[in-house]
Amino acid sequence: MVDSERPVPRGRIRRTMPLAGFTARAAGGRVVAGLRKRAGDSDAVDRHHERTAERYAELLGHSKGVLMKAGQMVSLIDIGSIGLDDVSPYQRALTRLQADAPPMNAALARSVLEAELGLAVEAVFAEFTDEPMAAASIGQVHRAVMRDGRQVAVKIQYPGVAEAIRDDLANTELLVTFLRFMRSATSGTIPDLREATEELSARISEELDYRHEAANITAFSELFRDHPFIRIPEVVAEASADRVLTMTYLDGIDWAAAQHVDQDLKNTWAEVISRMVTGSYRHGNLFHADPHPGNYRFGLDGSVGFVDFGCVKVVPELQRRLIVELARAAVEGRKGDLHRAMTESGFLSADSTLTAEDSYQWWAACVHELMVEQPATYTQEAFERGVRALIDLRPSDHPVRRMSVPPDFVFFSRINLSMNAILSALNATFHTRGVLNDMDGVAEPVSELGKLHNAWVRSRGLPYGLDHRVQS
């Protein structure tokens, strides 16, 4: 991801606050309860939250570990907008972790690069820009030119970040404790997400391995080879190693500039993003589990480049098929089939009290834009509706309270929320159900992009979403 965090100016990660203190401070909810007992003392509660939020932001900013990743995830959602006002100070404090920060100094970046590649920078690159173009989750990205003239982006991992995160992952209670802390700041409850945190930990651990990310890039590059409007970089193997990843540079404007183009171009980008994120598991078995606008390069020709593949999941065929069937049953109104698929996938136990109608109404909120009159427009209301369906658990009868989170589906909700946020920010209008139908192979395309995409699928001999396949 290119969501910035504080790079460490010295040679290794330093923690200025012990992570053990995180567990102790999670008891802060009891302090808040005591403050609330003082009639009318809302200011005392507010001050408590502000002070505690600052302490947690400082902890996350210096930890350079799993909590930093978790904090960034929380910061992406305006939880105050769904009524969890007690948590809003934490959201505001964590948002600062997204801001630009001083980069790892040039000498340190070059030393990591040379140690990993075993060659001087000048022996590998004809040009290397010391000023990073972006600060990523566990490293920073530099522009460079290979000696054969290829324009490239070079991602260099912060020294010590892998050790810090692995130390955190060894503490299996850490992410669970983080969730308990978030719960302590609210009057609501959060379901047991222990299995979900295990899946999240696995994906975070994989992000540390740049060779693993290089394999992900290659898999996506092969899947979308020759695509008319989805652009994936190629790995430059001779300039990559465990902590250095070099890939071909993708031209395009960034997310901030993309906000100022005409609406037709925004609509085009929205359909492209939708086809890449949901098409990767319809035409293949790949989940790009980190939809984030900072990871996109927007082409003025309507194409979109995707540049970060640290968080990818290879989906087992049975689970991939269930994901597609769940969406199809929902949009086609097959409530009984939807309920059965939710039970088969592990969302519901065999004796669940969630009825077929309950399940359908929940899905209808999650994929609302697929079910309304087409074309559909993504507005701020669309994003808030998705948040209410997935994480706003204030209602005591909220359907999620009666569900489990199957490990293979952990990133489904993240993709849903992130996609809604991106498409809503673009205020995009397009034939959302048409995209679903032609990629599943149940209807011919209705948009010009769809016709191009469909021709590409056929020319490549790729399967559609509902086609059975044997996963190698």
Image (cartoon, grey):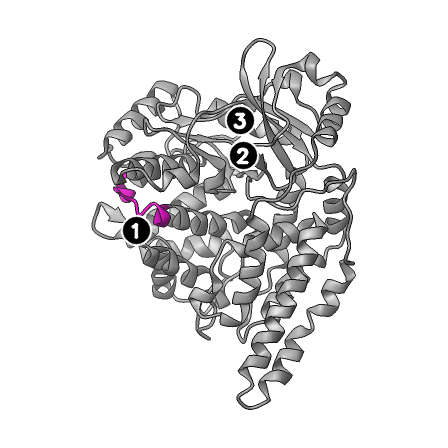
Label 1 vs label 2: CA separation? 27 Å
First in residue order: circle 3 vs circle 1? 3
Where's residue 76, x and y in %?
A: 50, 53
Q: Secondary structure at mark 3?
A: helix
> Is 55 placed left or right of 469 in the picture?
right
Label 3 vs label 2: CA separation? 13 Å
Where's residue 401, x and y in %?
A: 50, 68
Where's residue 82, x and y in %?
A: 43, 66
Please say whether residue 424 is one of the residues in the magenta stretch: yes
Q: What residue is at 77 percent from the left and 58 percent from the top?
A: 17
The three-letter amino acid code for the residue at tag 1 is Glu
When asked about the image quadrant of residue 196, the answer is: bottom right
Residue at which label 3 appears: 219
Q: What residue is at 59 percent from the left and 88 percent from the top?
A: 37
Q: Residues within 10 Å of mark 2 (few under 14, many from 20)?
A: many
> In the rendering, which numbered label is found on residue 369?
1
Where's residue 157, x and y in %?
A: 68, 34
The three-letter amino acid code for the residue at tag 3 is Ala
First in residue order: circle 3 vs circle 2? 3
* 175 versus 269 height, above or below: below
> In the rendering, which numbered label is found on residue 308?
2
In the rendered image, the quadrant that contains the C terminus is: top right
Q: What residue is at 28 percent from the left and 54 percent from the top?
A: 333
Pick the front one: 388 or 301: 301
The three-letter amino acid code for the residue at tag 2 is Asp
Q: Which residues are magenta?
A: 423-434
